[in-house]
Each structure stands twice: as structure tokens, then as C-alpha cells.
Amino acid sequence: MTDNGRVTATAVTSDKGPRDVVLLGSTGSIGTQALDVVRRNPDRFRVVGLGAGGGRVGDLAAQALEFGAEAVAVSRASALEDLQLALYAHAQRRGYARGESRLPKILAGPEASAELAQWPCDVVLNGMTGSVGLVPTLAALRAGRTLALANKESLIAGGPLVTPYLDRIVPVDSEHSALAQCLRGGRLDEVDRLVLTASGGPFRGSTRAQLTAVTPADALAHPTWNMGPVVTVNSATLVNKGLEVIEAHLLFGVPYERIDVVVHPQSLVHSMVEFTDGSTLAQVSPPDMRLPIALALGWPHRVPQAQPPMDWRSPQTLTFEPLDQAAFPAVGLARAAGIAGGTAPAAYNAANEEAVAAFLAGHLPFLSIVDTIAEVLDRLPLRERPTVADVLDVESEARRLARERIGVAA
């Protein structure tokens, strides 16, 4: 990802014309913003494949016809007929003849996303949510595609299965995109620390005692970012920041003890790199995911006017605060899981996904999300050099243990 660092992402550097893009998770927050980037840059990007879970087939069909996708994928096989009907309905509105060749090929079922990830293209953007993105991530990388990675869970769960392909991974998370941009300012051996910034979420400044009565509506009221419900809750617990610490270590090879987290409520400084000579480089921009998405799709080139810049003619205030680890222990827990390595990060993530689902459904208190993760990590044996089957097995067991604990907690 970086010119002088560990990740180089050299696979996409050609200027032969528009880059062909496959987008997984196209109906979600990252996906719709990525399509906006493509829509405004038709000379740079062309969508050839779109994938979604299957819950919003009308949106997927509309996207496929707007962008002329060659293939669409739904991971829920039962959504196949609904998608076919939606495509025909949208095609008729656009004046297509029934069965016209411009209608995309449909892939459906659990393997559809992985199949689409191997579709001929320049870049696969994995915007799926959760560790379900692991198999498509590996499929894209093994097929030789450059991977614009918004699905951090697949890197975290896959760990050593994914890191051999770092030369083809470009991070989309705003924090890791920021780090990659800052790392252009020096060699990796000149880096002293990576500093990830956190908005602090909706409960910044709260004590642990004040978090006992948090409701899903409270947790979903993020002060800065507009994200899906799982990521928004992860930001409220700071699990998301814990996952990002693991991701930063895996992407850039910096030891965990040299990766810090600071609270920056304005969300304008997206991360910083401190160099050995005492210099710190920061990437600063308004909170808008279109910038890191555009940079990932176009790497190593920037996309002009990806988003509006900072208005430096107006007063700006940037503040930084230490992280309250007592109120928000998720970051320390993730750091310990990352240091343990093997399947521990996969267990951390899987347990969290189960706990967040239970919290959103009203079956688990807010504070019990991280408590559930900690108990699962304590109970689950570590596998140090996992295969894909090992990762999937550990995830399944972590989910079972989490549901068992949640059943007691409920």
C-alpha cells in the first residue's frame, strides 16, 4: 500500500483506461458511496460486478442496470427469483426488451460472492459487513485481483491466510487509508508509532456506570459518521477501534506496543504516523468515506475532487484526549487477542458479531457486549497456525459460546 512501507499494492498501476471494478456489499453504506464515486468518475472506473446479501434486491437490480454490470450476486439463494423479477421490472422501465443481453448474469447462493470476487476486473472492493467477507477476500486475492478492503473483519479473522497477499491489498477504512498516506512521507524503518484516532462515539466521556442503561437507539446515534448498524454499535463500544488496531498491525507490520489510540471528537484527523526524528504526519479531511474509497479504487493515484476539502478560512478546533480504557476495555482486549495471534482475533470478532446482534434485538445489555467477547476468548482454545477450515470452525464455536452466554444474560 505504501511506496516505502510493507504494503505496496502494485497490481493496479496501469492507466489503460477506466478500471473495471467488482463491488461486494453494493447496497450497504460503503457500497452506495463507492457507486457515487464511480458515478462521478466514469472516465476512471467502470462497474462490472455487484454483490449483496439478498435483502435489498430492488436496490441491487437498479444499481446493476444503472451501471451496466455484467454480473450480480446474492448470497441468499432464496432471493434469486426476487432478483430476477426486480431486474426485469427495472429493465422494462428503462425500455429493455425482455431477456435482452444487457441484463447481467445472476449468481446466487453462499458461494456467489466468492465467485463474483474472481470475476475478470482490476479491483474488487469488499464492502461486506462481518467475517462472512473472508472467503470472498481470499477468492479475490488468489485470483490475482487488487483488493480494496473495507471488510476489515476478513483480514482480522483470516490473519496469516490473508497477509501473504499484502502487495495487493489497499485499505478503505479511513484510519488505515490515512496511515498509508502518511507513510508515503518516510520509510517504514523510520516509523516510531502509528496513532489511530477515534471519535469516541456517542458515549465519549461517559463512565462505565453511566453506560449500564444504554439502549440500541442511544448506541446508533453516532455524532459524526453515517454507517450501518453493526459498525455503528462497534464504534459505540470501541470494538471497531480494537479491530482497527489489529488491522493496522497486520497491514503495516508495526508491533502492537507501538500502535496507539487517541480520542479526537472532531473526526478531522483520521490517523497519524510518528517518525523516529520526532516528526508526526497527520492526514486531515472532513469525515467523508468517498475520499478513502476513491483513493483505494485509484491507488496509487488520487481522484480529483473525491470530496470537498477542509475550509481553512474558517476557524477550526482540533482536540485530542486519552482513551478511557476502564470505560471502554474493547481496545485493550483486542490488542491482547492480536498479540495472542492465531485464531484469537477471529474469535474476538465472531463473539462480537453475535453479541451486537443480541444487543440490537434487545436481548443483551450494552456493557455485556464486550464482557461476552472476553468470556469467549477465555474459554476458547487458541489455534496458532490456522487453515481456512480452522478459522471457520473457531468462528462457529465462538458464536456458539457467545449465544450460550447471551442466553444466560438474557
Image (cartoon, rainbow, N blue to C red):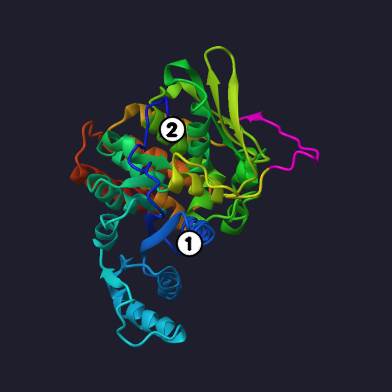
The residue beneath circle 2 is 248
Numbered label attached to residue 212: none
Looking at the image, can residue 14 be seen?
yes
Image location (x, y in percent) of residue 242: 47, 36
Q: What is the quadrant of residue 245 in the picture?
A: top left
337 vs 383, left or right, is: right
**Chain part drawn in magenta:** 310-323
Badge 2 crowding class, 10 Å Cα cut-off, few under 14, some 14 to 19, many 20 or more, is: many
Q: Depth check: give the residue in front, 76 or 174.
A: 174
Q: Earlier in the sequence, mark 2 or mark 1?
A: 2
Q: Depth check: give the residue in front, 349 or 1.
A: 1
346 vs 195, left or right, is: left
Q: Residue at x 41, y 60 (%)?
A: 46
Q: Residue pushed farthest front?
A: 16
Q: Residue pushed farthest top?
A: 277
Q: CA distance from mark 2 to mark 1?
A: 31 Å
In the image, residue 334 sits, relative to residue 363, either above or below, namely above
Number of marks drawn: 2
Secondary element under disc 1, as helix, strand or loop, is loop
Image location (x, y in percent) of residue 45: 44, 56
User: Is residue 320 one of those drawn in magenta?
Assistant: yes
Q: What is the quadrant of residue 279 in the picture?
A: top right
195 vs 124, left or right, is: right
Residue type highlighted by circle 1: Ala
Q: Which of labels 2 and 1 is toward the front?
A: 2
User: Is residue 201 one of those drawn in magenta?
Assistant: no
Numbered label attached to residue 361: 1
In the image, residue 289 sits, relative to residue 168, either above or below, namely below
